[in-house]
């Protein structure tokens, strides 16, 4: 994979500018497909909201950005990375779902006047959570890192599927049923068969549940058999291979579901569940202590009404 980035452009190396004073690193995982790998961290002034993966795809006529990170500040660094590699216009900014670490960089692309693309339920999700997302992100990032960040609603909705033409290649956007959230998209590049799963795929970083556990497990069964040259997770390496990439996530959610169902059957309450469910998975995931109890709480609320 070829890496690029920073402001001062040096001579070309392998067809990609070799740059000094790195700002935001990206890797070319397939021809014209670039991915930035975010950190396994909570939001902080130090990371500026750089905690998820962000990608861009360059066509003959235009560029599409897939997720924009967690603040306008780091979003501008992503935009600078794109502009260091190509002068083609940024026509689309696609959000794979509503979470702040994937959408608050949208503001950095306003001057490009792109179409903001999202699941048909993304607008509702962002509008319902806009005040809490703004307040919590500002509190965690601080005034300086969060400056200029805002909620930008989609201008182009994906009801079922939508194809975006970049010139010489197209992106197929597919709206998913409720799983990680109720507004997840999968995007596939026709030219390289690269699939962008967003937070339907976590690797290393523990998955987080803001939708339906049963829905996610059902979707995972479909994704296991999906054909793709490579998949880009929402959190994890730049690119991975199916079906192996999704197996740890499947194991985690299967254990959580099994443990929760057993406790409910035995008449145990949520407090007991948060102490015992899924503890066998602790060593397998980064950020376990930060997110696992929340996952169990959400799973318990869903499964107790089966």
Image: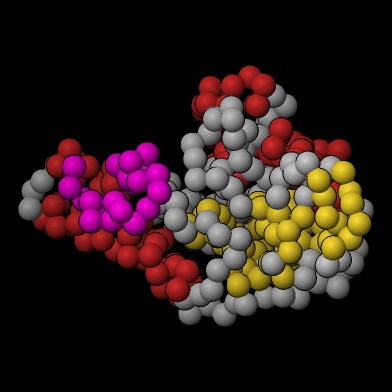
| Residue at figure coordinates x 78%, y 41% from the top left | 21
Q: Is residue 239 visible?
A: yes
Q: Quadrant of residue 192?
A: bottom right
| Residue at figure coordinates x 89%, y 67% from the top left | 60
Residue 182 is situated, as x and y percent measured from the top left of the image, at 49, 52
Q: Between residue 262 and residue 28, name the one nearer to us.
A: 28
Residue 214 is situated, as x and y percent measured from the top left of the image, at 34, 60
Q: Is residue 209 visible?
A: no
Q: Between residue 42 and residue 210, name the one nearer to us.
A: 42
Residue 94 is situated, as x and y percent measured from the top left of the image, at 70, 52
Q: Quadrant of residue 246?
A: bottom left
| Residue at figure coordinates x 86%, y 50% from the top left | 84
Residue 113 is situated, as x and y percent measured from the top left of the image, at 85, 43
| Residue at figure coordinates x 59%, y 30% from the top left | 46
Q: Magenta-highlighted stretch: main secondary structure?
A: helix
Q: Between residue 216 and residue 47, name the one nearer to us.
A: 47
Q: Is residue 273 above or below residue 198?
A: above
| Residue 276 painted magenta | yes
Looking at the image, residue 297 sits to the left or right of residue 238; the answer is left
Q: Between residue 238 and residue 233, name the one nearer to us.
A: 238
| Residue 222 painted magenta | no
Tell me where the magenta segment starts and ends, as one range. Answer: 275-295
User: Number of callouts in the render?
Assistant: 0
């Amino acid at each position: 994979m070829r890496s690029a980035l920073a402001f001062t452009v040096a001579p070309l190396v392998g067809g990609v500018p070799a740059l000094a004073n790195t700002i935001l690193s990206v890797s070319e995982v397939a021809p014209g497909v670039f991915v930035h790998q975010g950190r396994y961290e909570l939001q902080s002034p130090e990371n500026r909201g750089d905690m998820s993966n962000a990608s861009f795809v360059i066509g003959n006529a235009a560029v599409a950005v897939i997720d924009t990170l967690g603040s306008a500040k780091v979003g501008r660094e992503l935009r600078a990375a794109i502009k260091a590699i190509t002068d083609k216009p940024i026509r689309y900014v696609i959000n794979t779902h509503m979470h702040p670490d994937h959408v608050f960089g949208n503001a950095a692309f306003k001057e490009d006047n792109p179409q903001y693309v999202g699941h048909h339920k993304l607008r509702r999700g962002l509008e319902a959570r806009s005040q809490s997302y703004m307040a919590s992100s500002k509190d965690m990032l601080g005034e300086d890192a969060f400056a200029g960040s805002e909620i930008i609603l989609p201008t182009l909705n994906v009801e079922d599927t939508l194809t975006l033409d970049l010139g010489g290649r197209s992106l197929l956007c597919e709206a998913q049923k409720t799983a990680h959230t109720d507004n997840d998209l999968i995007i596939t590049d026709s030219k390289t068969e690269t699939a962008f799963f967003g937070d339907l795929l976590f690797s290393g970083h523990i998955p987080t549940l803001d939708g339906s556990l049963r829905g996610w497990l059902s979707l995972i069964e479909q994704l296991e058999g999906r054909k793709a040259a490579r998949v880009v997770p929402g959190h994890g390496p730049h690119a991975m291979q199916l079906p192996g990439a999704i197996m740890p996530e499947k194991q985690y959610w299967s254990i959580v579901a099994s443990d929760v169902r057993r406790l409910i059957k035995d008449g145990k309450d949520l407090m007991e569940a948060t102490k015992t469910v899924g503890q066998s998975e602790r060593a397998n995931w980064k950020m376990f202590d930060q997110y696992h109890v929340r996952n169990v709480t959400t799973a318990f609320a869903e499964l107790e009404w089966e």
